[in-house]
Image: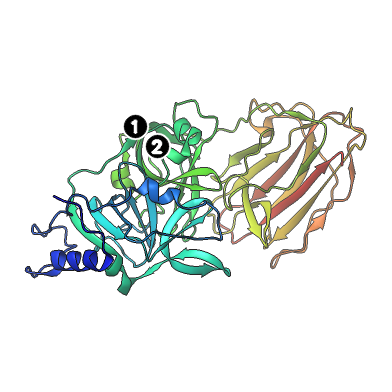
């Protein structure tokens, strides 16, 4: 079939006649056998070419040339509630997120369905470096790709047939980390992968929760799977052992992430052997000075800086990054956790002997913490080879925030703490919060040594 004459009015009219004329039908009904395939040559641009138009900068948008049409296959499914007001399309060159003000989306755009998008009245934007397609809008006063209002969706998007199979790319965790741009927006299948957080649910109820997964590909980093606390499966326990996971790859500030539609179909072949979260760490590096401000991470991601150890001895959560007013910090809490948590955040080895200024300082904030505690220790024998509690620790005197039992306390400076009598040590922050209490937590920021 010849390619369309690229006139926007003609294209819109053509699709309207194709999809609504002659036959009285709901063109998005997956059971309707009269749904017509989109004509060959409908796409005037690939998804990869479209995404390449955008600079990649957040807080900015890119206009799209006249008569630009992409065609892709729907790879997201919001029926289980894990994906909200977002539609992912992919073609042979890549995938893209389209923001729609529709919930749910799946009755209108089915998993595996071919969809054409007329793009020239839309814009490209990005959030955390993830390119998105939407209407011209503002977010916190800056240009953004906003959600396409429901009544306008049919002006931009036209559906074809639902395929019997959906294209899926085989990948490893290491490959995704090594070349995230090759996988972002696409549906991938990862084999021999397992959860690394122990026997925990997909999400904490009513909270978006990051869970860590890794395979046997040699990646030193686990990949985050982001799960909605409002999903139908939020409180189900993650399948234990190793198996195959199919997911959509996203990215935030350079860090790839996974999103699943529904574990009932996206988790296959898990052997059921219980996977315990590792309590051992990695050998800490030696530093002559340190100024840790906890910046450079996505909010709610586990803190993972080279040389540091972030170890959970009890519970399912590590110290994670939180942020307020453009300031990031390490945070730990048992608020609504429903579990006891004993979690350590351990610094690199501080070369006290060689330091000119042999002191450390840091800031803490207590947050709704009626019973949870934060203690500070040093250890000269910690090497990451086993659980932190199995090493020798000496508690040190530091001023810790204590005015946040009924709310958010104030940031409190520890004062300069002299380490000259301890020699070369790591500093360990131990959070201890009880189970089944409506308790809070603590935050840490601006850890400094030899400054």
Q: Secondary structure at mark 1?
A: loop
Which one is in front, 54 or 29?
A: 54
Left or right of residue 36: residue 138: right
Judged left or right of residue 293, residue 176 is left
Q: Nearer the viewer, residue 22 or 308?
A: 22
Q: Is residue 422 above or below residue 10?
A: above
Label disc, if present, on residue 271 of the rendered structure: 1
Q: Position of residue 441 (x, y in %)?
A: 66, 56
Residue 262 location (% of width, % of height): 33, 50
Q: Is residue 349 in view?
A: yes
List x then y, in percent, for residue 380.
Answer: 79, 28
The color scheme shown is rainbow
User: Dot 2 lies on which element?
Assistant: loop
Image coords of residue 440 (percent x, y): 64, 59
Residue marked by disc 2: 240
Q: Residue at x 29, y 52 (%)?
A: 44
Q: Please report the residue visible at 40 percent of the width from the left and 37 percent of the height from the top.
A: 240
> From mark 2 to mark 1, how far is it between C-alphas?
7 Å
Q: For label 1, count other residues whose C-alpha is less than 10 Å away and answer few (under 14), some (14-19) or many (20+).
A: few
Q: Tell whether 265 sits left or right of 352.
A: left
Specify the quadrant that holds the C terminus.
Answer: top right
**Residue shown at 92%/38% (left/top)?**
357
* Outermost residue toward the left in this view: 22
């Amino acid at each position: 079939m010849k390619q369309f004459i690229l006139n926007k009015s003609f294209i819109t009219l053509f699709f309207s006649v194709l999809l609504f004329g002659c036959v009285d039908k709901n063109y998005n009904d997956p059971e309707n056998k009269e749904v017509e395939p989109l004509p060959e040559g409908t796409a005037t641009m690939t998804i990869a070419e479209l995404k390449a138009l955008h600079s990649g900068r957040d807080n900015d948008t890119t206009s799209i040339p006249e008569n630009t049409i992409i065609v892709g296959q729907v790879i997201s499914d919001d029926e289980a509630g894990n994906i909200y007001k977002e539609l992912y399309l992919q073609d042979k060159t890549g995938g893209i997120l389209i923001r729609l003000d529709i919930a749910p989306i799946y009755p209108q755009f089915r998993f595996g369905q071919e969809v054409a998008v007329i793009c020239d009245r839309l814009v490209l934007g990005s959030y955390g470096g993830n390119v998105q397609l939407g209407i011209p809008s503002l977010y916190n006063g800056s240009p953004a790709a906003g959600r396409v209002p429901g009544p306008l969706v049919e002006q931009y998007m036209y559906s074809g047939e639902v395929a019997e199979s959906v294209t899926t790319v085989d990948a490893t965790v290491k490959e995704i980390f090594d070349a995230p741009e090759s996988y972002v927006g696409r549906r991938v299948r990862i084999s021999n992968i397992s959860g690394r957080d122990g026997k925990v649910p997909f999400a904490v109820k009513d909270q978006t929760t990051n869970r860590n997964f890794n395979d046997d590909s040699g990646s030193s980093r686990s990949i985050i799977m982001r799960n909605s606390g409002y999903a139908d499966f939020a409180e189900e326990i993650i399948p234990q052992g190793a198996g195959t996971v199919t997911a959509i790859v996203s990215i935030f500030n350079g860090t790839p992430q996974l999103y699943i539609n529904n574990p009932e179909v996206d988790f296959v072949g898990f052997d059921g052997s219980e996977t315990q979260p590792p309590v051992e760490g990695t050998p800490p590096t030696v530093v002559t000075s340190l100024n840790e401000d906890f910046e450079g991470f996505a909010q709610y991601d586990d803190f993972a800086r080279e040389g540091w150890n972030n170890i959970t001895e009890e519970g399912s959560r590590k110290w994670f990054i939180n942020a307020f007013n453009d300031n990031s910090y390490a945070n730990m809490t048992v608020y609504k956790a429903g579990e006891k948590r004993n979690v350590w955040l351990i610094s690199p080895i501080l070369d006290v002997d060689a330091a000119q200024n042999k002191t450390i300082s840091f800031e803490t904030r207590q947050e709704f913490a009626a019973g949870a505690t934060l203690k500070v220790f040093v250890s000269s024998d910690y090497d990451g080879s086993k659980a932190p509690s199995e090493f020798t620790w000496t508690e040190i005197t530091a001023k810790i925030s204590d005015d946040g039992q009924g709310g958010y306390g104030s940031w409190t400076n520890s004062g300069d703490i002299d380490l000259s009598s301890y020699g070369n040590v790591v500093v360990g922050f131990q959070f201890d919060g009880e189970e089944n209490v409506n308790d809070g937590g603590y935050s840490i920021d601006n850890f400094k040594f030899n400054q």
